[in-house]
């Protein structure tokens, strides 16, 4: 999950910029999901981590509660208070979860310690407003609408993966000023590539067909991506009808496309759309989630990496774009013109971006997408030119952590 990687990347560099990280999390035995232990190898030695207990899911699910943050809430709060009594805590940095954030409010009330919250997606979602009250999304929306004002009323600073992400809370919370916000995208971490060099593995599902160009998408396909993916597949269909020789050399592969634990045919969105459009013969979907480094290995074995925006969030900045950049493969992206991803890929000269906007919707981009697909299928060499390191550093995890550290400095009144 993205919040994990925000913390995983920043702990590598916080000490360099004058901050000692102390991590409070939940003991692994209380998770229901399969954990990615390979990520542990990427953490710095000697990291100070405290684990709490949680109520076992087998008991809490009797009353319909499986969320680990709810199950661990009391333990997290008590441990957080103990750490604040025993250690010199200057700032509490809260990852995006309503349960975690309200703990920050309690800590500030009890110890007068400032807290910073991290917006990676809007907390109060439009989707949650529209669904039935029988769905968990409806209850999550109501919980967010209750807790968000309590958290933001006393928050000291808000960071967000893009300005557009936190702009949505400016209107209802007009007491927050510009100085209360910092744009902080995820960064690219070269150390991840160094690790892959020492632990090579091959995803045979990528390279099973020869003499074709594998266009590979790794990640969940959310509802807000359906329209873009549909337009992308219509571009493939156009190639099928007009240039069959190009079509025969084209292959689409999707990995980790759903978060669902029990996967059904309805969760395989790429397959359903391919069947609807009529290009199912060149589409393969492997919906099970991939571990992080396996996902990076898959990206590196692709010929062209696919990246898609959300139609509902113009400023959407996909955190997974940075592993895509590190994979050193061409990227074919379809994004809203306001997304930071567009500027990032243009600056680094990695692949190509097809942009859409309110006045030029993605349905009108089919011809442009088809041209880009044809270009990559016909191109003899897909090797990428060297990245300008000075530009790359701007988007590195180290640079993003420096910005976060300076935010902490300002929060407690230190001079940068």
Image (cartoon, rainbow, N blue to C red):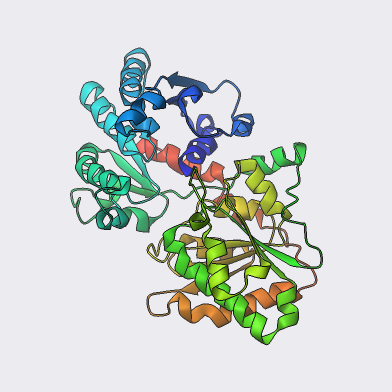
Residue 358 falls left or right of residue 388: left
For this rendering, which residue is in front, 185 or 281? 281
Q: Residue furthest top?
A: 86
Residue 328 falls left or right of residue 322: right
- Horizontal and vertical percent position of residue 301: 73, 54
Residue 29 falls left or right of residue 217: left
For this rendering, which residue is in front, 160 or 333? 333
Q: Residue at x 45, y 20 (%)?
A: 51
- Horizontal and vertical percent position of residue 317: 46, 57
- Horizontal and vertical percent position of residue 260: 48, 46
For this rendering, which residue is in front, 232 or 326? 232
Q: Is residue 61 above or below residue 382?
A: above
- Horizontal and vertical percent position of residue 347: 57, 63
State the image quarter where residue 377 is shown. Answer: bottom right
State the image quarter where residue 216 is shown. Answer: bottom right
Residue 365 falls left or right of residue 163: right
């Amino acid at each position: 999950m993205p919040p994990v990687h925000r913390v995983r990347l920043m702990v590598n560099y916080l000490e360099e910029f004058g901050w000692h990280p102390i991590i409070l999390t939940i003991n692994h035995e209380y998770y229901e999901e399969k954990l990615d232990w390979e990520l542990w190898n990427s953490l710095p030695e000697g990291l100070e981590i405290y684990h709490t207990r949680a109520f076992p899911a087998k008991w809490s699910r009797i009353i319909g509660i499986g969320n680990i943050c709810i199950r661990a809430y009391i333990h997290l709060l008590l441990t957080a208070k103990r750490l604040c009594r025993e250690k010199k805590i200057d700032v509490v940095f809260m990852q995006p979860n309503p349960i975690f954030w309200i703990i920050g409010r309690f800590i500030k009330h009890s110890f007068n310690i400032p807290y910073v919250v991290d917006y990676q997606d809007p907390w109060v979602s439009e989707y949650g407003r529209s669904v039935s009250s029988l769905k968990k999304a409806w209850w999550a929306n109501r919980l967010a609408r209750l807790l968000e004002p309590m958290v933001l009323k006393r928050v000291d600073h808000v960071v967000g993966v893009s300005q557009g992400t936190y702009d949505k809370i400016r209107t209802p919370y007009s007491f927050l000023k510009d100085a209360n916000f910092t744009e902080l995208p995820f960064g690219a971490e070269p150390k991840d590539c160094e690790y892959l060099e020492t632990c090579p593995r091959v995803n045979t599902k990528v390279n099973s067909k020869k003499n074709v160009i594998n266009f590979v998408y790794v990640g969940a396909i959310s509802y807000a991506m359906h329209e873009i993916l549909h337009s992308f597949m219509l571009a493939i269909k156009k190639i099928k009808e007009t240039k069959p020789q190009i079509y025969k050399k084209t292959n689409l592969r999707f990995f980790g496309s759903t978060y669902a634990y029990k996967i059904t045919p309805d969760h395989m969105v790429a397959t359903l759309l391919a069947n609807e459009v009529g290009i199912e013969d060149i589409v393969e979907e492997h919906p099970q989630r991939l571990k992080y480094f396996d996902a990076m290995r898959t990206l590196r074995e692709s010929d062209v990496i696919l990246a898609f925006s959300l139609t509902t969030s113009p400023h959407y900045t996909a955190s997974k774009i940075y592993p895509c950049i590190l994979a050193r493969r061409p990227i074919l992206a379809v994004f809203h013109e306001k997304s930071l991803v567009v500027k990032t890929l243009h600056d680094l000269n990695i692949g190509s971006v097809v942009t859409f906007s309110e006045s030029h919707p993605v349905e009108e981009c089919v011809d442009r997408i088809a041209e880009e697909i044809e270009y990559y299928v016909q191109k003899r060499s897909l090797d990428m030119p060297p990245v300008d390191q000075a530009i790359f550093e701007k988007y590195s995890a180290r640079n993003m952590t420096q910005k976060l550290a300076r935010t902490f400095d300002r929060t407690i009144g230190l001079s940068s």
